[in-house]
Amino acid sequence: MSRTPPSGLRRPARFALLVCVGLAGAAGCLSPGADVPYVQTPSDVVTEMLRLAGVNANDVVYDLGSGDGRIVIAAARDFGARGVGIEIDPGLVAYSTELARKAGVGDRVTFRSDDLLEANLSDATVVTLYLSYDMNQRLRPKLLRELRPGSRIVSHDYDMGPDWLPNQTIQVTWRDRKSNVFLWVVPPKS
Ligand SMILES: C[S@@+](CC[C@H](N)C(=O)[O-])C[C@H]1O[C@@H](n2cnc3c(N)ncnc32)[C@H](O)[C@@H]1O
């Protein structure tokens, strides 16, 4: 289904630029150890992802590969949630922590420098993704194992393959482009 390359803005964060110089290509910057490059989700798409997931003040929102932290910060600032960003690039972790402080949500969000495939997701009620089709495939068993039934997963641009169809798909128009956003609800444990 959706295997198109990421469609976010191309401007890297100031801290990320330090580690990405010389590596920036058409798809963004690939930090050391990263499985996918750093490309930002446009803010209109961020809002629609969080709306689609029905994020509210009771939620703990995890963004796996959190970049500059925009999804987690928006979840706290605009929807009253708490949030955790997992990001392999320590420069981006420092940058997003600073942005969260400036946005006034530093007490409700945390950014961790970690590999998203190793992170403990058990307290997440919502997981957000903007990774790749292959990473979603690798993550799928972990998500089903660690998340509680009823937890929601939203992904920008990439689905989970034919074996786990989304509960809902929307299309978001930003500038002159379109992004798909997919929603899954974690089923009861069998
Ligand atoms: C396409 S960007 C998305 C950034 C942000 N979630 C957004 O939507 O604006 C993917 C991010 O995942 C990070 N990343 C890639 N592989 C990772 C891994 N194995 N563990 C943690 N973060 C990773 C990259 O450094 C990058 O910041």
Image (spheres, rainbow, N blue to C red):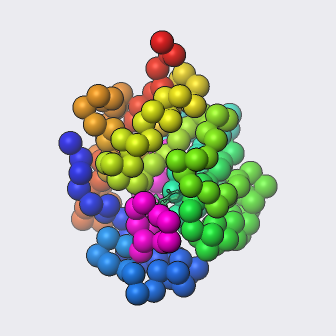
In the rendered image, residue 150 lying in the magenta stretch gets the answer no
From the viewer's perspective, is residue 171 above or below residue 99?
above
Horizontal side, residue 170 vs residue 108: left or right: left
Dominant secondary-structure state across the stretch colored magenta: loop
Question: Residue at point 38% right, 80% down?
Answer: 24
Q: Residue furthest left?
A: 1
Q: Nearer the viewer, residue 107 or 123?
A: 123
User: In the rendered view, would you say 92 is above or below 121?
Assistant: below
Q: Is residue 97 left or right of residue 166?
A: right
Residue at image x 57%, y 30%? 147
| Residue 90, picture quadrant | bottom right
46 within the magenta span = yes
Q: State which quarter of the image contains the N terminus.
A: top left
The residue drawn where x is 50% and y is 34% is 143
Residue 113 x %, y %: 64, 61
**Residue farthest along the bottom direction in this orientation:** 22
Residue at position x 64%, y 34% in the image: 122
Residue 127 at what x, y percent from top left? 53, 41
Residue 142, horizontal then vertical, whole percent? 50, 35
Q: Quadrant of residue 4?
A: bottom left
- Give the residues drawn in magenta, as a range: 29-50
Q: Which residue extends farthest top?
A: 190
Q: Farthest right residue?
A: 107
Q: How many marks?
A: 0
Asked if residue 32 lies left or right of residue 157, the reply is right
Q: Position of residue 6 (x, y in %)?
A: 32, 61
Instruction: Please indicate, yes or no, whether residue 80 appears anywhere in the rendered image.
Output: no
Residue 158 appears in the rendering? yes
Q: Along the line of sight, which residue is nearer the eye, 69 or 20? A: 20
Q: Quadrant of residue 69?
A: bottom right
